[in-house]
Image (cartoon, helix red, strand yellow):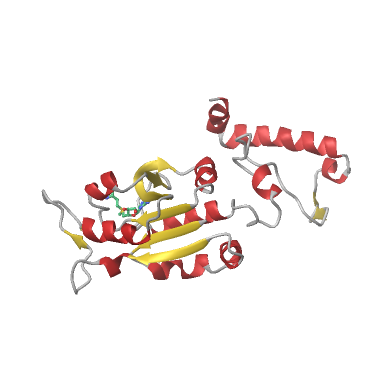
C-alpha cells in the first residue's frame, strides 16, 4: 500500500510513524508512507496556505490552490482521497478494513476552519470523522486512521488471528476478557475454564462473554450486527 498524508505539520508524525507496528510495516515494505508538506505548495514566497473566509466570520480557511497542487503531486489512477473532518462519516473498524484494501490512499489533514469547499467537492472521495469532537488539525486523526489501516495489512501483525478475533471483528462484538500469568494475583483468580485445556468450553465461554460484554457496554453494536 502507498499512503500519502497531506499535512501542514509533518513533524507531528515523527513519533507514531517510527515506532512499533507502523515502523515495522514500513521497514518490511507493506506500506510506503510519504508526508506531503502542504506549505511547499503555497501560492507565495511567504508560504501562505490560508485566507479569510468569504462572507466573514471567525478563523481562516485552507486555500484551494495548495490543496489541489499537493494532491496532484502524488495522485495515481488508483488513489482514493480521504479528507479528515469532524463533518465526515464516523470512522469504524469496517472503514479501516475497507481502506486496507485500497492500493493508494491520500489522506488530507485540515487546519484552522477547514478546507475550501471546492477542494472537498472536486477532489475528495470520502470524508472521515474520528468522532463528535473538534481537534485543532487533521494530523492526529490521520495518524489514528493510518494505524488502524496499516495493522490490517497482511503480515503487519505478529499473528493474523489478532485482527480477526478482536473487538468489532466479523461478529461485530467486543472482545472477551483476557488474562495472562500468574493464575492467582493478589487473590484474583483467572476463571477456571481458561485453565481447563478444553478448547470447546473455552470457545463457548468466550463467546458468551463477548455477548454479555457487548450488551453491557455497547448495546448499539448488537443492533448494528443485525442490520
Ligand atoms: C478546527 S477543525 C475545523 C472544524 C470545522 N470548522 C467545523 O466546524 O467542522 C480543523 C481540522 O481538524 C481536523 N479535525 C478536527 N476534528 C476532527 C475530527 N473529529 N475528525 C477528523 N478530523 C478532525 C480536520 O481536518 C479539520 O479540518
Residue at image point 35% right, 57% down: 109
Residue at image point 39% right, 68% down: 10
Q: Quadrant of residue 171?
A: top right
Image location of residue 82, percent across then percent down: 39, 49
Residue placed furthest toward the top = 226
Image location of residue 62, percent across then percent down: 24, 57
Seen from the viewer's position, the closer of residues 85 and 218 is 85
Residue placed furthest toward the bottom = 45
Seen from the viewer's position, the closer of residues 119 and 194 is 119
Please tell me how many numbered marks the rendered image carries. 0
Residue 3 as seen in the image, left or right of residue 169: left
Image location of residue 144, percent across then percent down: 48, 55
- In the image, residue 24 sits, relative to residue 171, either above or below, namely below
Residue placed furthest toward the left = 55
Image location of residue 81, percent across then percent down: 38, 50
- In the image, residue 27 sits, relative to residue 214, either above or below, namely below
Residue 47 as seen in the image, left or right of residue 103: left
Residue 126 as seen in the image, left or right of residue 143: left
Q: Quadrant of residue 52?
A: bottom left
- In the image, residue 134 sits, relative to residue 15, either above or below, namely above
Can residue 3 be spotted in the picture?
yes
Residue 84 as seen in the image, left or right of residue 54: right
Can residue 62 be spotted in the picture?
no
Residue at image point 54% right, 27% down: 223
Residue at image point 78% right, 37% down: 203
Amino acid at each position: 500500500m502507498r499512503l500519502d498524508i497531506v499535512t501542514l505539520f509533518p513533524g507531528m508524525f515523527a513519533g507514531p510513524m517510527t515506532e512499533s507496528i507502523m515502523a515495522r510495516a514500513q521497514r518490511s515494505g507493506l506500506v510506503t508512507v510519504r508526508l506531503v508538506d502542504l506549505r511547499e505548495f503555497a501560492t507565495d514566497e511567504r508560504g501562505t496556505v490560508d485566507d479569510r473566509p468569504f462572507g466573514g466570520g471567525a478563523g481562516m480557511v485552507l486555500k484551494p490552490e495548495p490543496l489541489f497542487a499537493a494532491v496532484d503531486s502524488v495522485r495515481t489512477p488508483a488513489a482514493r482521497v480521504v479528507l479528515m473532518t469532524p463533518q465526515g462519516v464516523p470512522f469504524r473498524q469496517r472503514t479501516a478494513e475497507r481502506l486496507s484494501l485500497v492500493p493508494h490512499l491520500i489522506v488530507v489533514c485540515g487546519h484552522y476552519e477547514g478546507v475550501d469547499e471546492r477542494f472537498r467537492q472536486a477532489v475528495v472521495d470520502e470524508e472521515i470523522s474520528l468522532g463528535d469532537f473538534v481537534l485543532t488539525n487533521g494530523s492526529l486523526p490521520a495518524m489514528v486512521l493510518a494505524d488502524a489501516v496499516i495493522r490490517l495489512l497482511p503480515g503487519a501483525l505478529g499473528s493474523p488471528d489478532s485482527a480477526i478475533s478482536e473487538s468489532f471483528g466479523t461478529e461485530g462484538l467486543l472482545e472477551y476478557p483476557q488474562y495472562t500469568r500468574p493464575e492467582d494475583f493478589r487473590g484474583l483468580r483467572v476463571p477456571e475454564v481458561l485453565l481447563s485445556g478444553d478448547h470447546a468450553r473455552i470457545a463457548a465461554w468466550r463467546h458468551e462473554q463477548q455477548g454479555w460484554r457487548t450488551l453491557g457496554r455497547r448495546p448499539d453494536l448488537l443492533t448494528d450486527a443485525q442490520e
